[in-house]
Image (spheres, helix red, strand yellow):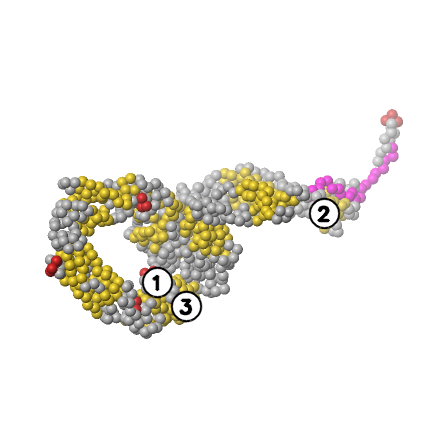
Amino acid sequence: MSHCFNPSYIQESNRIVVKTKLTTAPSTPAAPIVTKATGGMVEITWTPPLDSGGSTSVRYVLYALPKLPLYNGTNVSFAIYGFRALSNQSYYVVAFSEGGSSTPSPTTLAATTDVSSPSAPTSIGVTKAMADRLVFVWQSPIDTGGATVSDYEIRRNEVSIGHSNTTSFEDSGLMAYTSYTYTIMARNSRYPSAFSDPVTFRTANATAPSAPLNVRTAVTGGTVAASWDPPYSNGGLASLGTHCLLTRTGALVQDKWIPTTSSTCVFTGLTQNTTYQVTLFARNDVSNGTAAVVNATTSKATPPTSPSIPVVRSQVGAFVVVEMTLPLDAGGLSVSKLTLYRNSTIIGVVPVTSSNVSSYNISAGGLLARTRYVFQASAFNGYEGPLSDGLVFTTAAPSTPSMVDSVRLVEATATSVAINWTLPVNDGGSPDTLAFDIRIQSSQSNTTASIVKNTSMVVLGLAPNTLYNISVRCRNVAGASTWSNVQQMQTLSLAKGTCGWGVSTVQTKIDAGSVSVPLVRRGGTSGAVRYTIRSTSTGNVVFTCPSSITLQDLQTQASVAVAITASTAYNPNASISLELIADTSTNAVVTSLFANVTIFVDEEDNAGVFDFSMSTITVREDAGLVSIPIRRLRGAMSTVVWTPSDATASRNGTARSGTEYQLLPNQRISFATNVTQASLIVSIINNQRPQFPLLFFCLTLVKVSGGGYLNRAGNDVLCATIYNDWTPAIPSRVPNQLNVVKSTGGLLQLAWLPPPYTGGSGVFITQYSVHVFSNGSLVKAVTTLTNATAASIGGLMASTTYTLSICAVNRIGTSIGMNFTARTTSLPSLPGTVTSVQLSQVTGGFMLLVISPPDDTGGVVDVNYTVFVYSRERSQFEVKCCEVEF
């Protein structure tokens, strides 16, 4: 050691030699301090000990209480991560050297802040590079900010493209061999981080697309509809579309190209119960992609779908040409015909001659000018398909009618001709104004006569034995047609002529009362002639008839009235014979070919008129043997035997004999004399297979022996519907029998029949939905509150035709609507009763009333109200305000 003094007094001090010891442990470090803190990290810093113990390399161990080592090294600071926000921890430091360890430093309490932004993600690297996608990963933020990092936002070329809750991301839909720059931002529950440093990756070279994904099919009897999800990879190029192939046993059936705007391919016109193979592959500019292949089997034949809305191609007067198009789905069978409906009534059927022809035209007449019609179409393949949506079409003004056809001579005399003709094919749409002009020309005269409505005329005052040219034309409010082709007709020369019966046989019934037999004079009309009538009968027919008849001068026709006495007896061979005998005193002559006439007297009514007691029935599939009643009306004489016959095919029935039902073999239904009721038995086969549409079959009767006949005007055919009651379903269609109970200018009060099938056992109709259309647009929809089959539709306009449809509703759903039915409101009428009057505000001398308008406005837009207030003083109602308009 040395001591320093003023240099001017320097003297050498005593010298002391000091020698340090061997290396010792460092002294105790000072308490560490917190130099930085966030919500998820703290940075701890400490100072070296004053005494290093003589060592040049001191190491430090940072501990968290109680004794958790966090750091071991020569640095004098350390950042600790992974904390939750607003947490704390105590720390201390121990110094180490080759001389040993120091005692622990004093502890320091370090606390994190409230939640803060996480640090940016790091170490972004690509793990897979393909033509159209990149897969990359990254390291999560080392500082979470004191809360869990729950989301990462990925940006490509500075545009956000998605989020991830993991540390990986697949970016698809990229272009091949193209560089993309990415940055990633982390987000905890409160704040986002800064974006990471940008990195750039490049996609691989372009390839063909992969196969379409999740291919699924839906089938009917005649269609296969395939749909799919896009391929996993488009090969790095824009898709050009999808190629769809349908094959059967290796042979190509259909080939379709689907643009990128669609992911559905529908193959139509297929065969029922047939397995097809659907092959799909996407295409880009490289080539076709990998194929996806599925098998699809069409179902049992189903009714065809509805055709598209019919199109009116032309309309002239009463005729319209309508185009109908085949449905997309033929149901697995060939469509054999298209049916056109006008206002829910069939007006024409077109046979389908070739599946290669998609549309057919049909000409329909009987239209009225300036009238609104609804045209619909259906297709038939053995099953009748549903009706198409309706085309609402209003005809144009009347046009001139077409030319009259078939002008014929009915009878000629010496001074007259009787002619008739047929109505024009096209009446111009105005049949009520039709009239006819008749032109009669000869070498000596030229006249024109006019008549209205009738299609026959007797032209009088003609010359005997003269040739006339006769033609007819038609006219209506729009004008006249051209004249018909000239028909030459000649009057007879003056002569007596010959007479004979106008017919050789006459048919009548035993209860007809009388029958007239025509007598015709031919070859002349000059002078009176007299004839004797000889009559006989078979089958005990009681009758009376004149014994003679006289035709006067110029008389060409007469009739003989035969009175027949009614009887309840049955004789299958009853008849009356009349013979005409000339009276020579009048120079009468009988035409030998017409000298005799036979009147066949039909007594079949006395044996009975037979039909089913109802036209339709409903049976359950598990019904077993079903008894169907048959009745005998009118007479009941003699024994009559009938047998049932299957009429399912002629009525387009959907049930199959032997599979869903079976007639008992050699079944005979016998009606003894005076027996009026019997029944036939049919077996319902319970195959326990739900079917929809509902199956039905039809029966008729064929007579085996006896008299009587089938009542063609009654229930000559019975159709039975089989329902699967264990499978609840929507109701069947409401019958197309819509009645207008009341019609005013603004209201239609409707009533209808319930559907024959409510949806199964224990399923009931809950309400009905009534839809009202005008000019093709829905104007009103009314839902009944109960299952009552009636509703009043108000708020309508006067003298307007509305198209209505009604649907039944049960707990399963809503039925198909009844066929559109047109109904028309009346002329404007008085409004109905106000719905309600409510008191809204009242003072000592003022009342404010709220009036709900009536359901029936009378069919006019403007409705005014008059308010009457009852005066107790005068005991009468008084007008307090008038013409209150709402």
Compared to 297, does 34 lie above or below? above
| Quarter of the figure with residue 581 | bottom left
Looking at the image, can residue 342 be seen? Answer: yes
Amino acid residing under circle 1: Gly
Q: Which residue is mark 2?
A: 87
In the image, what residue occupies the spot 60% across and 46% down?
Answer: 869
- Image quarter where the N terminus lies is top right
Observer-side mark, 3 or 1, equals 1
Q: Position of residue 626 (x, y in %)?
A: 40, 69
Q: Earlier in the sequence, mark 1 or mark 2?
A: 2
Q: Residue at x 34, y 58 (%)?
A: 382
The residue pinned by badge 3 equals 686
Which image quarter: residue 271? Answer: bottom left
Q: Residue at x 69, y 42 (%)?
A: 38
User: The residue under label 3 is which amino acid type?
Assistant: Asn
Q: In front: 33, or 102?
A: 33
Amino acid bearing label 2: Ser
**CB within 8 Å, label 2 to label 3:** no
Q: Is residue 558 magenta?
A: no
Q: Earlier in the sequence, mark 2 or mark 3?
A: 2
Furthest-top residue in this view: 8
Disc number lying in front (1 or 2): 1
Q: Nearer the viewer, residue 396 or 387?
A: 396
Q: CA distance from mark 3 to mark 1?
A: 31 Å
Q: Quadrant of residue 474?
A: top left
The image's mark for residue 714 is 1
Chief secondary structure of the magenta portion: loop
Mark positioned earlier in the residue sequence (3 or 1) = 3
Q: Which quarter of the rendering shows the C terminus?
A: top right
Say few, some or many: other residues with alpha carbon within 10 Å of mark 2 (under 14 / 14 to 19 / 20 or more): some
Query: Where does the image place residue 753, in percent across and percent down from the top left?
Result: 44, 58
